[in-house]
């Protein structure tokens, strides 16, 4: 996606807001911090797809379970112009943006 | 872990842990009947067969679902009505062996992509009303019943000792087993049966089990509810939703069923094998996004559930306080949603079925029970929802801790919080007037606000206390009215007018005095005064959007039909209008939420492969609605006399009430009844009340006239054979029965409009037997 004169990827930064949305526990965080979707457990409700603030959880037409980036680095290796890299970036706590923002 | 999620495995509720000797419990069971069936797949929303379990004959059978049945009855509640029609007699009562307890699903039940698609619709003949009662309830039972292979379950007959019914969708087996050692109260039984029947001792295995249970309170009252479990893998407990109204739990226990267990092999997103899964996912994702972006500014359901209504109702003078005498109360802010928000466990997906992101099913975890047999236990309280809080404000209980205590015990004892609260509020008012007193109440001091007495009433009820008051009080307001009158303890008008029941069922928790349309929304109903048919207070009273009888009648046609539709499909009503698209107010008909109606058309088509329109889906409901009314008529309970409502729901019964809204009532006498201000000054309050009483009673009858006419019924409220034929019904037994009732009404002079019309006012039509005219 183009913003100003640079490009941005709609890709999961492993923040894991979706973990709390999954009714069946199909989403979990691995020890290395990566959020994984277990397609055998997933019931395809699309809650994680709709609630992801980055639009990084997506649904392909071929199956009901969504898919997401697992920071495996394949794209980095495949990119012919070496435009991509895999980096560790600290995140701000943005939980409030998604949950129960109302100040009750 | 940057975001501080609740890790599923680690979360602890702090609840008291129970351990049972599973082997001992299982060994004590005897299998009375066992049945093996061929597992099938659900096709486009239908399992295409229903299951019947007869506890008297110990037979277990399957019935096919025909295409005709789908076309005429759609599914869910429609199927339930059809099955009941084939099984009962007009003389069948709640405790007759042939009465059935039916649990149905519906073609959209069990989809996960659209929020609110896991409802079970339960039906039976109610002990309170002696006619059909239907409840739409969450929890996993409905979806699992379908995935196990059945669109509906009929429980017939009566067992001679306590039993459980097990539907094992993994093994393809159904059994009736004795259950001598099982618990009865739901918070224990649901957990016990979940653990006993889960294939493995894992959370995900337990999540594949759902239980229907009731409790000891249901055994000794007419208020028994059904608890439908949904196992929560984070809280690690079997949570419950209630099919509360009309005493269905009482029927369950009368049949000596402790629990019904259903287990599935596997749950995935396409268990319904929908015709167009892509469409389903697209429409679902759209509304999930709406909920994400707008819920916090609209109803805030994700944070506080339906409890957000308390402050709104209080602000609009609609919160029932002290038995509906008042609609607002100085202490009400103690029960506003922030108070409960502080107690609820947060950041857990609280849908009562997978994929419900509206997630209104909140809980208080680790709540310490402080009265009764479970005193000292720490438990999860499911709720409180708005109705339970309203039941408490009605009894003048203003401490959230007592609301939780009341909520917990009602649920575990299997008692409907609404009926128990509304009835107790009435007993309290009678107590205040001295019509009831300590002596007459078996020593209970039932003053408004006495929470200890309320809980004591529940505990005694659950124990089966034989006191004269307990025996009557547990059967509800209608029976208590008769009891008071028989004993000559109070004047008839006061006793009748204050008790908020209609058709024998207690009212749910809204004050309807200032909204005529809503009075109709409670009175001109099928099962009794429950707000699930229509909620028109804002449209009518606040926005004055339906001023004429014709407008009101149109609303009392469209909304009951529309809302019936959720029950035909196994859906929850809340994601229809408890979340609205951002531009809803700019549409032509905001109260209908047109975009969401279109969503529902789309998802029904996406699942079933049909090509219905928004008019077709109303027709689906109209069939079911008329069929149910016709069955009520058949049972002697579906005519104008049965649509009677107490005056407390129409206007001020006492002087205190009149004075509390004096300006409003005085203005109405001036504006609507052309009494001049000088004349009004000369009238004493009781005289003003008398004039208002007659005016409002007549308004209600005129409303009934308009509504019956709009629905295509006779002036006595009977669906006509002509109407039924137009809807596609050809069942001659039904058509003949209706004709006979209409002829009998004609002889008795009942085919006349009920309102008194003066000046240039006119009844809906001057044509006699208008329904016999062509083209009607
Ligand atoms: S789509 Fe699957 S992974 Fe996402 S929330 Fe629903 S069940 Fe969980
Ligand atoms: S809105 Fe509430 S009641 Fe309806 S399905 Fe969702 S969680 Fe259940």
Image: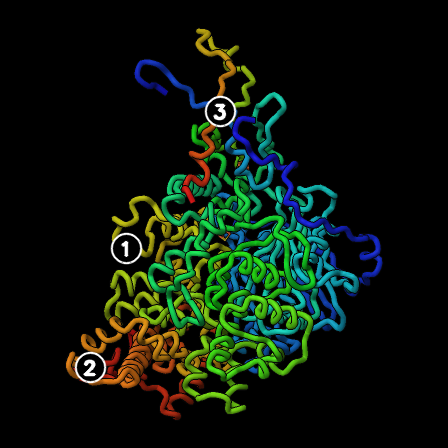
| Chain to which mark 3 belongs | A
Residue at x-position 51% and y-position 80%: B478
Is there any visible trace of residue B565 in the rendered image?
yes
Q: Separation of disc 1 and disc 2 at Cα?
A: 40 Å
* Disc number for residue A12: 3
SS type, badge 3: loop
Ligand 1 positioned in quadrant: top right
SS type, badge 2: helix
Of residues B651 and B639, the one drawn nearer to the viewer in this rendering: B651
Instruction: Identify residue for label 2.
Output: B680
**Quarter placement of the N terminus of chain A:** top left
Q: Nearer the viewer, mark 3 or mark 1?
A: 3
SS type, badge 1: loop
Q: Earlier in the sequence, mark 1 or mark 2?
A: 1
* Disc number for residue B589: 1
| Chain to which mark 1 belongs | B
Residue B704 in the image, given as x and y percentages of width and height = 34, 77
Q: How crowded is mark 1: few (under 14 residues within 10 Å), some or many (20 or more)?
A: few
| Chain to which mark 2 belongs | B
Residue B720 in the image, given as x and y percentages of width and height = 39, 78
Residue at x-position 72% and y-position 73%: B56
In the image, B607: left or right of B247?
Answer: left
**Quarter placement of the C terminus of chain A:** top left
In the image, B29: left or right of B718?
Answer: right
B677, above or below B487, in the image: above
């Amino acid at each position: 996606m183009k913003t100003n004169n640079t490009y941005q990827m709609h890709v999961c930064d492993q923040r894991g807001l979706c973990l709390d949305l999954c009714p069946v526990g199909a989403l979990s965080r691995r020890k290395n911090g990566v959020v994984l979707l277990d397609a055998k457990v997933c019931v395809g409700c699309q809650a994680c797809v709709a609630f992801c603030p980055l639009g990084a959880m997506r649904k392909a037409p071929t199956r009901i379970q969504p898919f997401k980036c697992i920071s495996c680095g394949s794209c980095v290796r495949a990119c012919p112009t070496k435009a991509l890299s895999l980096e560790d970036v600290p995140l701000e706590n943005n939980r409030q943006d998604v949950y129960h923002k109302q100040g009750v | 872990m940057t975001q501080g999620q609740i890790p599923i495995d680690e979360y602890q509720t702090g609840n008291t842990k129970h351990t049972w000797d599973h082997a001992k419990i299982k060994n004590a069971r005897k299998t009375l009947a066992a049945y093996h069936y061929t597992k099938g797949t659900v096709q486009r929303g239908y399992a295409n067969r229903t299951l019947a379990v007869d506890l008297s004959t110990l037979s277990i059978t399957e019935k096919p679902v025909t295409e005709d049945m789908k076309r005429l009855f759609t599914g869910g509640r429609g199927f339930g009505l059809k099955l009941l029609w084939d099984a009962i007699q007009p003389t069948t009562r709640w405790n007759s062996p042939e009465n059935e307890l039916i649990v149905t699903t519906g073609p959209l039940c069990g989809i996960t992509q659209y929020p609110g698609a896991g409802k079970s619709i339960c039906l039976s003949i109610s002990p309170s009303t002696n006619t059909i009662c239907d409840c739409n309830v969450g929890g996993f039972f409905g979806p699992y019943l379908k995935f196990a292979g059945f669109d509906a379950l009929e429980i017939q007959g009566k067992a001679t000792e306590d039993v459980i019914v097990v539907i094992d969708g993994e093994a393809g087996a159904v059994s009736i087993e004795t259950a001598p050692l099982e618990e009865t109260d739901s918070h224990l039984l649901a957990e016990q049966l979940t653990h006993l029947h889960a294939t493995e001792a894992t959370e995900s295995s337990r999540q594949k089990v759902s239980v229907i249970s009731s409790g000891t309170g249901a055994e000794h009252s007419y208020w028994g509810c059904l608890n439908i479990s949904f196992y929560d893998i984070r809280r690690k407990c079997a949570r419950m939703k209630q099919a509360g109204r009309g005493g269905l739990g009482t029927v369950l226990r009368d049949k000596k069923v402790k629990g019904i267990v259903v287990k599935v092999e596997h749950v995935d997103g396409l268990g319904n094998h929908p015709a167009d899964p892509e469409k389903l996912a697209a429409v679902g994702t759209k509304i999930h996004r709406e909920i994400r972006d707008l819920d916090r500014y609209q109803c805030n359901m994700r944070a506080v559930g339906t409890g957000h209504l308390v402050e709104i109702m209080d602000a609009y003078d609609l919160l029932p306080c002290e038995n509906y005498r008042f609609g607002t109360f100085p202490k009400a802010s103690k029960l506003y949603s922030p108070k409960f928000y502080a107690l609820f466990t947060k950041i857990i997906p609280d849908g009562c079925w997978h994929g419900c992101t509206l997630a209104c099913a909140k809980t208080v975890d680790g709540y310490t029970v402080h009265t009764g047999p479970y005193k000292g236990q720490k438990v999860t309280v499911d709720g409180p929802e708005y109705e339970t809080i309203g039941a408490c404000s009605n009894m003048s209980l203003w401490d959230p801790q007592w609301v939780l205590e009341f909520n917990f015990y009602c649920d575990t004892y299997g008692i409907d919080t609404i009926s128990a609260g509304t009835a107790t509020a009435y007993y309290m008012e009678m107590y205040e007037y001295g019509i009831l007193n300590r002596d007459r109440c078996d020593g209970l001091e039932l003053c408004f606000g006495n929470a200890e007495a309320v809980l004591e009433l529940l505990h005694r009820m659950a124990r089966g206390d034989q006191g004269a008051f307990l025996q009557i009080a547990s059967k509800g307001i209608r029976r208590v009215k008769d009891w008071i009158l028989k004993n000559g303890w109070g004047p008839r008008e006061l006793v009748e007018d204050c008790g908020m029941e209609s058709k024998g069922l207690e009212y749910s928790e809204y004050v309807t005095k200032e909204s005529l349309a809503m009075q109709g929304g409670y009175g001109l109903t099928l099962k009794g005064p429950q707000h699930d048919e229509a909620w028109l207070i804002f449209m009518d009273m606040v926005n004055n959007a339906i001023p004429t009888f014709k407008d009101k009648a149109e609303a009392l046609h469209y909304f009951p039909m529309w809302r019936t539709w959720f029950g035909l499909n196994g859906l929850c009503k809340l994601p229809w209008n408890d979340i609205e698209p951002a531009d809803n107010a700019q549409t032509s008909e905001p109260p209908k939420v047109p975009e969401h109606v279109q969503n529902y058309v789309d998802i029904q088509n996406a699942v079933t492969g049909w090509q219905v329109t928004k008019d077709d889906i109303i027709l689906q409901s109209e069939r079911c609605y008329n069929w149910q009314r016709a069955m009520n008529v058949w049972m002697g309970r579906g005519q104008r006399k049965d649509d009677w409502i107490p005056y407390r729901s129409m206007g001020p019964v006492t002087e205190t009430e009149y004075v509390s809204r004096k300006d409003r009532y005085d203005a109405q006498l001036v504006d609507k009844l052309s009494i001049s201000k000088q004349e009004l000054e000369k009238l004493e309050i009781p005289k003003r009340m008398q004039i208002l009483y007659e005016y409002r009673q007549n308004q209600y009858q005129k409303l009934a006239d308009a509504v019956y006419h709009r629905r295509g019924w006779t002036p006595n409220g009977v669906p006509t054979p002509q109407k039924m034929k137009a809807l596609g019904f050809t069942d001659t037994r039904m058509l003949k029965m209706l004709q006979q009732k209409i002829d009998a009404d004609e002889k008795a002079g009942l085919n006349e409009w009920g309102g008194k019309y003066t000046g240039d006012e006119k009844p809906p039509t001057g044509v006699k037997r208008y329904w016999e005219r062509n083209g009607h």
